[in-house]
Image (spheres, grey):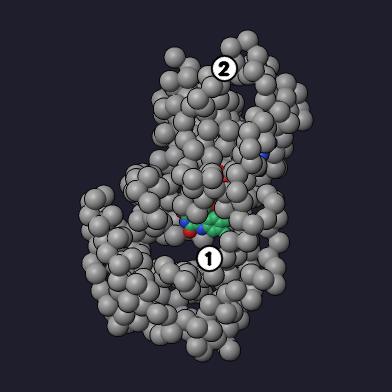
Amino acid sequence: VSDLPARVDVAIVGAGFAGAATARALARRGVRALVLEREAEIGRYASGRSAGLGRQLCEDDATTALAVRGAQLLRETPAWSPTGGILSFDRDAHADEYAARAERFGIAVERVDRAAVLQRWPALYGLPIAAALVAPSDGTIDVAALLAWLAADIEIARGVAVERVEPSGGGARVTTTRGTIDARVVVDAAGAWAGAIVGDAPLDTYKRHVFVLDGAVPSRSPWLWHLGDDEVYVRGDDGRTLTSPCDAAPCAPGDQQPDADGEAAIRARLRVAAPATERLTIRRAWACQRAFTPDRAMRLGRDRDRAWLVHAIGLGGHGATAALAVGERAADAVVAALA
Ligand SMILES: Cc1cc2nc3c(=O)[nH]c(=O)nc-3n(C[C@H](O)[C@H](O)[C@H](O)COP(=O)(O)OP(=O)(O)OC[C@H]3O[C@@H](n4cnc5c(N)ncnc54)[C@H](O)[C@@H]3O)c2cc1C
């Protein structure tokens, strides 16, 4: 987009998974939207830095519903690989809770013991595994492919930062670094910056590191996500192993510099989980924020008081898997707001 239009039906702030998926779902509903992205490239923040685990069973039912639907839609895109996933637990009761959730959502899982997990990930013999669930319908997401697929059929104005959004004539006036746009509906999909442009409280943002390793923990499939006090995940990545200590240090939006605390965290985790970590070689490291609402539920839908505003925010740690379901929910809310 070279010249910004003076007026649009729908302006979406942010071209991460939330904003891009909303625009794509709107296109499918016959509604044109303009996505405004501050950066010159898409995927500069969380969406381009996700670890790509397509995990359907989450900590709560509301998030699980979105992840299950998101995975269903992802299977029809080139971004999904049906690798399966393993969730392991340091407490039996925690595994029971997840098994019950799997049943509620119709997700087939096989309960296996520690030995079965170690057959797939033998280096991780230090993990305190009480029980595990194998979910064959989980997968792995190629995040670059997903962003490219989402961006293909939508209109994105790159390098346009939204400075503020104010009510105006039944809709809203969107002030950007490249001019002003009047929109009937505005979607806040600003990720870690959500709320800022519409005068709402900021989300809680936490920095998480991801590392790509050589050696100590040979790459295997399906991926393994260990839930508990020593939370850690591992998945194969082109013959190397991608891993995260699942760290969550409170930090300001935009800080994505890998730091010494993150590296210390993965070394400490793997010292316990894979006691052969002296050989651990870090090939790549990155970090980014995960953004949460105060109750940790994704906020998707129309604002209670402002008829022109739709939220697609607080995707937390499951926004890659849930992306296309987030888009559906937000797009339905936009259609209702336009009616
Ligand atoms: C390290 C890490 C690993 C993860 N791993 C997984 C995983 O394995 N599986 C999974 O399902 N999820 C994972 N996630 C979660 C997932 O990546 C996020 O939930 C998701 O990417 C959030 O998408 P978003 O669109 O809300 O935010 P973002 O991707 O941050 O997009 C927001 C966009 O808004 C733009 N923006 C902000 N303010 C403005 C403004 N004023 N004007 C214009 N543009 C603006 C930003 O530039 C940005 O591009 C991970 C997250 C992190 C950080």
Looking at the image, residue 123 lies above or below residue 301: below
Quadrant holding the N terminus: top right
Q: Residue at x 53, y 84 (%)?
A: 271
Cβ of mark 1 under 8 Å from ligand 1: the answer is no
Q: Position of residue 86 (x, y in %)?
A: 35, 68
Quadrant holding the C terminus: top left
Q: Residues within 10 Å of mark 1 (few under 14, many from 20)?
A: many
Q: Residue at x 30, y 67 (%)?
A: 93
Looking at the image, residue 256 lies above or below residue 227: above
- Kindly indicate the quadrant of the structure image that contains residue 176: top right
Q: Residues within 10 Å of mark 2 (few under 14, many from 20)?
A: many
Q: How far apart, in angstroms, are the residues tagged by discs 2 and 1?
A: 40 Å
Residue designated by label 2:
184
Looking at the image, residue 43 lies above or below residue 55: above
Question: Is residue 44 among the parts visible in the rendering?
Answer: yes
Q: Residue reaching furthest top?
A: 169
- Point out the frontmost of discs 2 and 1: 1
Task: Assign a secondary structure to mark 1.
Answer: loop
Residue designated by label 1:
246
- Kindly indicate the quadrant of the structure image that contains residue 141: bottom left
Looking at the image, residue 77 lies above or below residue 12: below
Q: Position of residue 204 (x, y in %)?
A: 60, 48
Question: Is residue 152 among the parts visible in the rendering?
Answer: no
Front-lying residue, 99 or 83: 99
Whether residue 101 sits left or right of residue 151 in the image: it is left
Q: Position of residue 284 (x, y in %)?
A: 63, 70
Q: Amino acid at mark 2?
A: Arg
* Nearer-N-terminus badge (2/1): 2
Task: Assign a secondary structure to mark 2.
Answer: strand
Q: Amino acid at mark 1?
A: Cys
Q: Position of residue 319 (x, y in %)?
A: 48, 48
Whether residue 242 sits left or right of residue 281 in the image: it is left
